[in-house]
Image: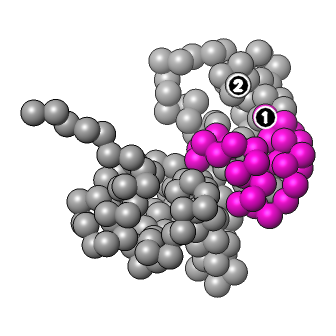
Amino acid sequence: MVIRAISESELVAAAASGDERAFATIVRQHADAVYGHALRFFGDRQAAEDATQEVFIKVFRTIATFDGRARFSTWLYRVTRNVCLDMNRAGRHVPQPVDPVTIEPLSEPDFANDVVFVQTFERAMSALPAEDRDALNAVTLFGLSYAEAALALGIPEGTVKSRVFRARRMLGTLLRGREGGVAGELH
């Protein structure tokens, strides 16, 4: 028996035609990226969980409208971003502002303590300007090319590149601190 890997377009088509297993596979494949974007947008785990749930409800209801002109991840990124923005506009969840000055850098690179690193990294991500964070999330979390991110964000490709560069540079500065930190892990 030969098992053939199903392509993303076949998986999306199956989900669009009502195949619940295909949709569940899509959710499993993309839940981390959706949750990660929402967590970085809101800075709050509960808000991120709510947004993730809303994203996949919206995807379930509208997947048949996906036309395949862009990659599915590009479409999903737009849905995720719009759900976060809509939740923010509705006042249901508000992004938590973070003062970059209050972020405590790791005193030394201690990779045995992943929890501290993740918390420090997420606080640093929250300190980024929203436009830079969106561009970085599109490229790193959703794996979009600069051109795809530009299309999803509705801005020129060069602007995406500069925002991603600025975000990486600021993250490096915030995480490096005075002790050398973990900035090398960002690239």
Q: What residue type is disc 2 on?
A: His
- Disc 2 packing (10 Å; few <14; some 14–19; many ≥20): few
Nearest to the observer: residue 1 or residue 81: 1
Residue 159 visible in the picture: yes
Q: Which residue is drawn at 37% across and 70% down?
A: 16
Q: Do the residues labelled 1 and 2 touch (CB within 8 Å)?
A: yes
The label number, if any, that marks residue 89 in the structure image: none
Task: Name which quarter of the figure residue 141 lies in.
Answer: top right
Q: Residue at x 60, y 61 (%)?
A: 69
> Percent from the top left, x then y, of residue 151?
75, 59
* Cα distance between the residues tagged 1 and 2: 8 Å
Q: Which residue is drawn at 30% across and 39% down?
A: 5
Residue at numbered disc 1: 168
Mark positioned earlier in the residue sequence (1 or 2): 1
Asked if residue 50 is positioned above or below residue 141 in the image, the reply reads below
Nearest to the observer: residue 168 or residue 10: 10
Horizontally, residue 40 falls left or right of residue 155, namely left
Residue furthest bottom as drawn:
90
The label number, if any, that marks residue 187 in the structure image: 2
Please report the bounds of the magenta region as a residue range.
Answer: 139-168
Nearest to the observer: residue 74 or residue 165: 74
Q: How is the image coloured?
A: one colour
> Percent from the top left, x then y, of residue 106?
67, 24
